[in-house]
Image: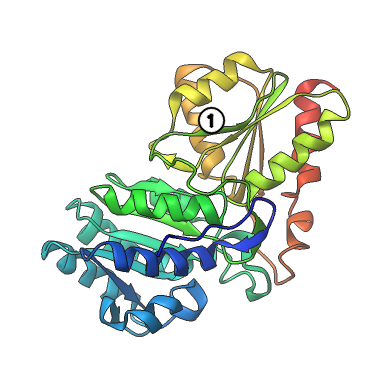
């Protein structure tokens, strides 16, 4: 059965896409297995547990053991897809991922949900603002942050084809679909989703939809905003980042993550080396989160479309 995509404009949780593409890829290929830490209902992986229980290895609430075991699974030739909440996969099992997986360049795919204020009511301890910084600092690791449910499914297939350790973010709350079905996804390649000549917004994850909304708002004010989806944070698409610096008056980075060490930092590092430019950072301002609704917290933390638009106005000088 063909993989079913969602329509552009629908609001869909990326974890729903995770469950759908897992079942699809279980029927397409036999070279991978899911490792779960008793959170399949939370990560979106439950459809696979129900349809293909033989493709799931259950570790209970023992993330360090699960991560260490993934290295052994990888050595058998199977591809382990490790699934848990980001606070547990990126922090609790960080040492095992760094040493047992990344150091040896084992072919493990770490797919974590519960990231940013997208988590909503679960609050500060579950709202992972540090995962991009933590994972991109580890050598040999590719970091992927899809913009929506449709892109996630394409990205997941590309991640399975990629040889080496990958960290991938899974959003929890509904977010607008911005990509058509079967849109091409290539690891390491950014995607210019909207042309513009005054300012560029480089965004990832749920912030891509907010950047597009901000661009529409500013078009009515005579400000032309380019929007770039940086769905691969590492390796970064140097050419696209430099093009934005050369062709527009400044860059706004937008992420549901701490501005310390995240996607914005990766963009700034790239610009500092290749083409210095004016940059404004939209993200979590180095604080912990709070419990609240997923559609209220972005305004509280200054990462909503209005905040992106305000930063663009500043760089455009209007």
Residue in the image at 20% along x and 63% along y: 31
Element at label 1:
helix
Query: Can the viewer see residue 288?
Result: no
Residue density around tag 1, few if under 14, some if 14–19, many if 20 or more, within 10 Å? many
Residue in the image at 82% along x and 32% along y: 218
Residue for badge 1: 268
Residue found at the very far front of the displayed protein: 1
Left or right: residue 181 versus residue 65 is right
Where the C terminus falls, by quadrant? top right
Q: Where is residue 242 in the image (x, y as percent from the top left)?
A: 51, 20
Instruction: Specify the quadrant of the image occupied by residue 307.
Output: top right
Left or right: residue 190 versus residue 297 is left
| In-front residue for pair 194/63 | 194
Q: Position of residue 165 (x, y in %)?
A: 28, 52
Residue in the image at 31% along x and 83% along y: 53
Q: Position of residue 119 (x, y in %)?
A: 62, 67
Colouring scheme, one of rainbow, by chain, secondary structure, one colour: rainbow
Query: Can the viewer see residue 79?
Result: yes
Instruction: Specify the quadrant of the image occupied by residue 55.
Output: bottom left
């Amino acid at each position: 059965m063909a993989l079913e995509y969602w329509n552009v404009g629908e609001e869909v949780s990326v974890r729903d896409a995770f469950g759908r593409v897992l079942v699809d890829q279980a029927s397409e290929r036999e070279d991978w297995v899911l490792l779960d830490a008793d959170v399949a209902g939370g990560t979106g992986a439950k459809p696979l547990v129900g349809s293909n229980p033989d493709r799931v290895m259950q570790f209970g609430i023992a993330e360090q053991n699960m991560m260490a075991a993934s290295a052994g699974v990888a050595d058998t030739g199977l591809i382990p897809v490790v699934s848990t909440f980001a606070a547990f996969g990126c922090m609790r099992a960080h040492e095992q991922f760094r040493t047992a997986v990344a150091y040896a360049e084992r072919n493990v795919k770490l797919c974590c949900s519960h990231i940013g204020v997208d988590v909503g009511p679960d609050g500060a301890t579950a709202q992972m603002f540090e995962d991009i910084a933590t994972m991109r600092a580890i050598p040999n690791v590719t970091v992927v942050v899809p913009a929506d449910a449709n892109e996630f499914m394409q990205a997941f297939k590309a991640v399975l084809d990629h040889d080496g350790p990958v960290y991938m973010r899974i959003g929890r709350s509904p977010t607008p679909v911005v990509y058509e079905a079967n849109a091409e996804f290539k690891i390491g390649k950014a995607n210019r989703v909207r042309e513009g000549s005054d300012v560029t917004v480089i965004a990832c994850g749920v912030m891509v939809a907010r950047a597009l909304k901000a661009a529409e708002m500013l078009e009515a004010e005579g400000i032309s905003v380019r929007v770039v989806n940086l769905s691969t944070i590492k390796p970064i698409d140097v050419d696209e980042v430099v093009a934005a610096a050369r062709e527009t008056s400044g860059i706004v980075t937008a992420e549901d993550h701490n501005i310390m060490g995240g996607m914005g930092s990766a963009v700034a590092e790239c610009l500092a080396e290749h083409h210095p430019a004016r940059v404004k950072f939209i993200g979590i301002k180095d604080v912990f989160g709070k419990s609240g609704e997923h559609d209220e917290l972005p305004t509280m933390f200054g990462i909503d479309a209005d905040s992106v638009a305000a930063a663009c106005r500043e760089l455009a000088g209007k």
